[in-house]
Image (spheres, helix red, strand yellow):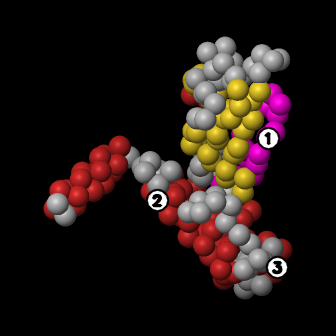
Amino acid sequence: FATWAPLIHALYGDKLNALLASDTTLKRNFIDSVWACITINFGPRTVTFPHRDYANLPFGWCAITALGNFDPDKGGELILWDCKMIIRFPPGSTILIPSAILRHSNTRIALSERRYSVTQYTAGAIFRWVEHGFQLDEAYYASLSKAEAAKDTKTAAGRWRRGRAMFSKMSDLVEAAEATLARKQQSK
């Protein structure tokens, strides 16, 4: 995630760190994870129907991991409907997708096989909770003056544009990789 979408990854990390600092009873799911939520589907033959995860951050990413014992050449493929792609998705594989905007599902497996999944994500409401000062939307909006409310409306209108700008361009990724290689060579 940090390699392919460093700006979005940093946003996730910043918001999760702020959330955890605001409530010491909350714990990170995994060391160094930037996702606040995890869903574990115990199967025994986990299948999802075509869907988008509308409650997630629209420009955000989630990590989907397939587990179990199934023949990936005969089932369990991941389908990205909007991209018209069917992806071989064997047990132990993880994929990162913007699940709020891409309709996705997976195919069935044989009755004798087992498939489980682990999905890591951060719900959009968690981003709002942090951005609204760790309070519900109703309390946040009630606390705003007319000028603050107008500013918030303007900020919200540009959120998607700012989110889209956080997606990496290949040229940015190549430049970052070259800079990393140069630093490693200098340190030798």
What residue span does the magenta drawing correspond to? Answer: 39-57
Task: Give the amino acid type for the residue marked by disc 1 in the picture.
Answer: Asn
Task: Give the amino acid type for the residue marked by disc 3 in the picture.
Answer: Ala
Q: Which mark is residue 139?
A: 3
Q: Is residue 172 above or below residue 147?
A: above
Q: Quadrant of the rendered structure where residue 148 is?
A: bottom right
Magenta highlight on residue 51: yes
Q: Is residue 133 above or below residue 163?
A: below
Looking at the rendered image, the quarter that the C terminus falls into is bottom left
Q: Nearer the viewer, mark 3 or mark 2?
A: 2
What element does badge 1 sit on? Answer: strand
Cα separation, mark 1 vs mark 2, equals 29 Å
Cα separation, mark 3 vs mark 2, equals 30 Å
Task: Give the amino acid type for the residue marked by disc 2 in the picture.
Answer: Leu
Residue under circle 1? 41
Q: Which mark is residue 75?
A: none
The percent coordinates of residue 43 (x first, y second) are 82, 34
Residue under circle 2? 7
What element does badge 2 sit on? Answer: helix
The percent coordinates of residue 139 (x first, y second) are 82, 79
The percent coordinates of residue 51 (x first, y second) are 75, 35
Q: Within 10 Å of the Cα at label 2, are there few (<14), some (14-19), or many (20+) other Cα atoms?
A: some
What element does badge 3 sit on? Answer: helix
Q: Is residue 123 left or right of residue 158?
A: right
Q: Main secondary structure of the magenta part?
A: loop
Residue shown at 73% from the left, 79% from the top: 23
Magenta highlight on residue 150: no
The percent coordinates of residue 61 (x first, y second) are 59, 49
The answer to which of 151 and 117 lies nearer the viewer is 117
Q: Nearer the viewer, mark 1 or mark 2?
A: 1
The answer to which of 16 and 67 lies nearer the viewer is 67
